[in-house]
Image: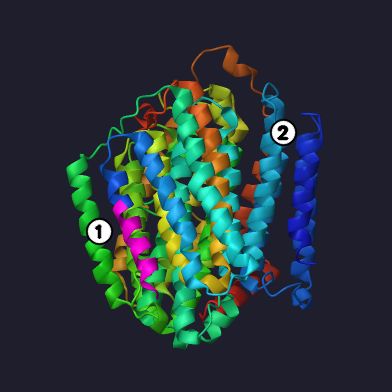
Amino acid sequence: MVVYLIIVPLLGALLTFVLPSDRARPWIVAATAALHTALTVAVIRAPDIDVSDTVWLRFDALGRLVLLVISTLFLICATYCIGYLRVRAERPNRIFCTALMIFLAMTSLVALAQHLTILWVGMEATTLATAVLLYFNQNRRSLEATWKYLMIGSVGIALALLGTLFLAYAALIGLGEPVLLFSDLVRRAAHLPAPWVRTAFVFLLVGYGTKMGLAPLHTWKPDAYGEAPGVVGALLSGAMTTCAFLALLRVVRIVDAAGQGRFARELLVVIGLLSMATAAVFMVGQRDFKRLLAYSSVEHMGILVLGIGIGGAGVFAALLHVVNNALTKGVLFLAAGNIHRAFKSKRLEDVTGALRRLPLSAGLFLAGFFAITGSPPFGPFVSELAILVAAIDGRLYIVAALYLILLAIIFIGMGSTVLAVVQGVPPDDAEGRSFRESPFKTVPIIVSLALVLMMGIWIPEPISALLHAASRLLGAS
Amino acid sequence: MPPISDSILIVLLLTNFFVLGTANLRAAIRAVALQGVLLSLLPLFVESHATLRLMTLVGVTAIVKGAVIPALLLKALRDVHIGHEVEPYVGFVPSLFLCAIGTALALLFSDQLPLAPEHRAGLFVPASLATLLAGFLVLTTRRKAISQVTGYLVLENGIYVFGLLLYQAMVVEVGVLLDLLVGIFVMGIVLNHIQREFSSLDTEQLSRLRE
């Protein structure tokens, strides 16, 4: 049962690859995405389906949660793609669509993996698929972004492999065999030698942290998100980084069970605050609204690891923020993609008055900005507030104060750029007016925003149950 | 651990210094090929029974790391008609010095780690860490895309050495296979595109995207 979630998108990839028609391919992608979401929902609604095909792939609460996030965001993006690829009809889309399908298959593999090596293989394959997606525009700038992404990403993934090997070695010494199954490692973690566990954690944090884009390993992010199509930015910042975060969560659970939780959490708090601070520095006065979103992604990855680092109720809050962040990033990147297309620029010098030219997209962009910066009544408000409360409950007053100050700076910095984009009078050029806000390019964004709003007002019972089960799995009460 | 494997590892460490110290890109690629051949011999000292798996690992490592990838890089070097100078950001003497410090630290650090009894005498862990560090140095201090790929390959070689300590876990093979994918397909293809777009493989030209 579980493997269908990987096989279905792989079949979709095969189909998009052999199909000769550029017009039909986006529909195949969207149909496969819909099937994938239907399968995901079916599996989540039937808790007794827990029985696994193998010990390596399995549905635990954490995997279900991540899978639900990935699948929903992918369906939104795939629907948007139908409209987007119609606008970009001059470009062949065979490789792009195939890479999209492989991306879905591999992120699902990461969500289901119960074995550190399989998890790593999934992340590596995701990296390769995204490199192809980044290069869609095939110009010098996207080439540069792809090269940087590949070099930095490959080093990150190599260090994650070394961290994985270190954990296996810890198991070899402590348990007599190189175990890499999560459940085995967690159960027998008390026997793992501490120096190896700590070294392994540092390498895995650096490795998967690079994929998440935590500062100071975030340098690929502004270039990649700046040059990639908006829809690829949404998938990277909502799905790929979520997968990397999941990998980190699995590792933290093992390290925690091995009695090194304190060491791990201190590192996570420091790197989380550092990421937020780095994002704040580069967001103030940012003249490029797609790079602005990239730094916003750095910030929110920081918030996620900060939540885990705080521990206790912070774990639940961080998991809730995974959902909120992914959906809100969907709104922001897709709306930014429309604005970018209509103005043929992403610099503030050329883009003003978006609300007049593209009332719907610019309105959604503005709403997305309020949502991501934690304004009520949207979802991120709830999760960001919960992390603050967890920090105060844990008596981490300095952390709480820094967190609040950084959030405030980012709100002001991001706000000035976003307002400059949406307000004012659009430049007078006939060409720009030709862009139409067709339903395919707006309805997916509206749906995404509606979900963000729902998460802020009322969290549906199955999702709330899933969040609780996932935080129990991570050892939080 | 038989002393022959330690001799191989010491030669591996020396090639690290050579890759960092040579001004000639072609020589650096050849040194990486030599590293690949050295690595392919190491599994013979980890596993004493001549199983099919062992022989395959030795053969595939020798072919891929010792021949195919270096040959691809040398071909790329010929095709693009770029100079054979390495052009580092950091001079040769300082980078050799850094590498020496790194190797010493790797030796000290691996002394602190608890090792399985059969690994205590060998050089596998320090050699792995030192090679990793040398690869990282090459990767970060060189200007040309091909040099950076060379650094990445050295870095991977370091990981391979460590993977051998876990021979029973079958993780070495996974690493080799997937790194192959990165090495040949992706970097090969992207190098090709960089060359076509910029008529050069100097990553200095890849500097439009800045704050």
Depth check: A389 or A239 in front?
A: A239
Instruction: Specify whether residue B12 is painted magenta.
Output: yes
Res A142 seen here? no
Q: Is residue B14 above or below residue A439?
A: below
Q: Is residue A152 left or right of residue A274?
A: right
Instruction: Look at label 1 and name its amino acid.
Output: Gly
User: Which numbered dot is residue A427?
Assistant: none
Secondary element at image label 1:
helix
User: In this figure, which residue is indicated by the disc labeled 1?
Assistant: B102
Q: Quadrant of the N terminus of chain A?
A: bottom right
Give residue A444's position: percent from left, percent from top.
Answer: 69, 42
Chain bearing mark 2 = A
Q: Magenta residues, as a range?
A: B1-14
- Which residue is depicted at the point 77% across and 56% down? A7
Res A60 seen here? yes
Q: Residues within 10 Å of mark 1 (few under 14, many from 20)?
A: some
- Which residue is depicted at the point 75% across and 74% down? A52
User: In this figure, which residue is indicated by the disc labeled 2?
Assistant: A94
Task: Examine the image and state in which quarter residue A23 appears.
Answer: top right
Give residue A333's position: percent from left, percent from top.
Answer: 55, 40
Could you give the CA–CA distance between mark 2 and mark 1, rounded to whole angstroms? Answer: 46 Å
Q: Is residue B46 left or right of residue A101?
A: left
Secondary element at image label 2:
helix
Q: Is residue A341 above or below residue A79?
A: above
Instruction: Specify whether residue B196 is painted magenta.
Output: no
Instruction: Look at label 2 and name its amino acid.
Output: Arg
